[in-house]
């Protein structure tokens, strides 16, 4: 418990010798964010709990069933997603991270001169290689079920059979 | 649970003031089920739109009965739909209110005599708080119905009702 209070106070002020020293509370810049997060979490808990205390509660079987626009609920909501969305999500993630890393780089690379430019270029080239690999492997292709094309082999074979019969007769 | 809901058998002054607060909160934010049945629903939509602006009374259509306080039965209630309406009403959390809009849902309307497929009034399946007459009622009539409902809520009580036939907390 003391440890928790210590952590809290350390976040509030730069350094605190909690049980042994008189405290001077002064918010650090990060401490303000911490207080904000704490208030946000507390607000949710308190609001939900107060609503729980005050609201009428008369649960019935109908009220507790799944809402399906008035119909009887049917089947499980845990449906299988098509595997092709996995590839889309993966590629999206890669480029998302790329953007996150490139935006701060783009803000400062002029000051860093040719070295900064080269670092960014190498990073982009690496990603481009990865992209080329994905492309070659066919992950950018939208996976479709293979269509069985009807062939004329059977008809051909019957025709040849007929010809064979003719030649035989 | 409900810390105050029907926990008291007689009203005193503290309860009365709490009631005022509760009732004021409830009547000022009556969220309706986004639900329309027939031609009355067109008038209901017109009421929600900017010209009549249902929102100024705190009425917002919600996509789920779980988040709703009032259901406006706007149109002809067929037998097929009555089952669904009953379920939607049952799935709304307490406190819940019903506005019956138009002749069809009030009493069957033009289908009273020969409508083999029409429920003769939605009050045969769910309890109705306010009936709005008309075929279909104009948006002003629906607004009047809503004001009547607000008046009703303003005089509600969290005191346990004395009637023995009440189906509530114990159910």
Image (cartoon, coloured by chain):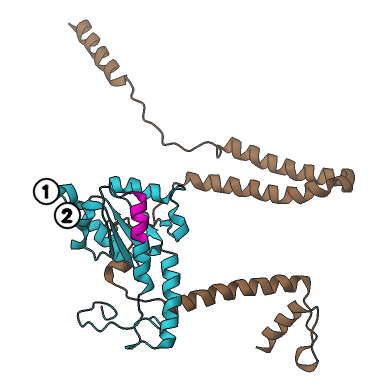
Q: Looking at the image, is B112 positioned above or below residue B167? A: above
| Residue A130 shows in this picture | yes
Query: Chain A shown in which color?
Result: brown
Residue visible at 43% across and 50% down in the picture: B52
Is residue B65 in view?
A: no
Q: Which mark is residue B119?
A: 2
Image location (x, y in percent) of residue A51: 46, 75
Instruction: Classify mark 1: residues with Cα within 10 Å, few (<14), some (14-19) or many (20+).
Output: few
Among the chains pictured, the one given cyan colouring is: B
Q: Residues within 10 Å of mark 2 (few under 14, many from 20)?
A: many
Q: Chain of mark 1?
A: B
- Residue at the disc numbered 1: B116
Magenta-drawn stretch contains B81: no
Residue interval drawn in magenta? B138-146
Task: State left or right for residue B115 relative to residue A87.
Answer: left
**In what quadrant of the picture does the C terminus of chain B appear?**
bottom left
Q: For the point 44% across and 64% down, which residue is it?
A: B29
> Distance of mark 2 from mark 1, alpha carbons?
8 Å
Residue A163 in the image: above or below residue A96? above
Horizontal relation, residue A169 to residue A151: left or right = left
x, y percentage for residue B164?
A: 20, 83
């Amino acid at each position: 418990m003391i440890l928790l209070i210590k952590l809290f106070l350390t976040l509030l002020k730069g350094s605190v010798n909690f049980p042994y020293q008189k405290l001077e509370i002064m918010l650090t810049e990060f401490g303000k964010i911490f207080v904000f997060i704490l208030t946000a979490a507390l607000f949710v808990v308190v609001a939900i709990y107060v609503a729980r205390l005050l609201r009428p509660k008369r649960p019935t079987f109908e009220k507790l069933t799944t809402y399906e626009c008035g119909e009887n609920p049917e089947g499980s909501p845990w449906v299988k997603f098509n595997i092709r969305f996995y590839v889309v999500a993966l590629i999206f993630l890669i480029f998302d991270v790329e953007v996150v890393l490139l935006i701060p780089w783009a803000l400062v690379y002029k000051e860093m001169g040719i070295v900064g430019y080269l670092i960014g270029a190498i990073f982009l080239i690496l990603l481009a290689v990865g992209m080329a690999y994905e492309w070659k492997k066919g992950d950018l292709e939208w996976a479709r079920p293979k269509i069985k094309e009807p062939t004329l082999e059977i008809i051909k074979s019957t025709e040849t059979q007929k010809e064979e019969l003719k030649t035989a007769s | 649970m409900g810390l105050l809901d029907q926990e008291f058998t007689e009203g005193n002054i503290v309860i009365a003031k709490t009631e005022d607060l509760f009732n004021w909160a409830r009547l000022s934010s009556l969220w309706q089920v986004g639900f329309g049945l027939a031609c009355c629903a067109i008038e209901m939509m017109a009421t929600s739109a900017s010209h009549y602006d249902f929102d100024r009374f705190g009425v917002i259509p919600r996509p789920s009965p779980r988040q709703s306080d009032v259901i406006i039965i706007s149109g002809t209630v067929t037998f097929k739909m009555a089952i669904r309406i009953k379920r939607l009403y049952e799935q709304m959390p307490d406190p819940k209110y019903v506005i019956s809009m138009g002749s069809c849902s009030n009493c069957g309307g033009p289908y009273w005599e020969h409508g083999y497929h029409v429920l003769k009034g939605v009050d045969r399946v769910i309890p109705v708080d306010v009936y709005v007459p008309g075929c279909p009622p104009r948006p002003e009539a629906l607004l009047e119905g809503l004001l009547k409902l607000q008046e009703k809520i303003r005089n509600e009580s969290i005191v346990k009702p004395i009637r023995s036939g009440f189906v509530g907390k114990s159910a």
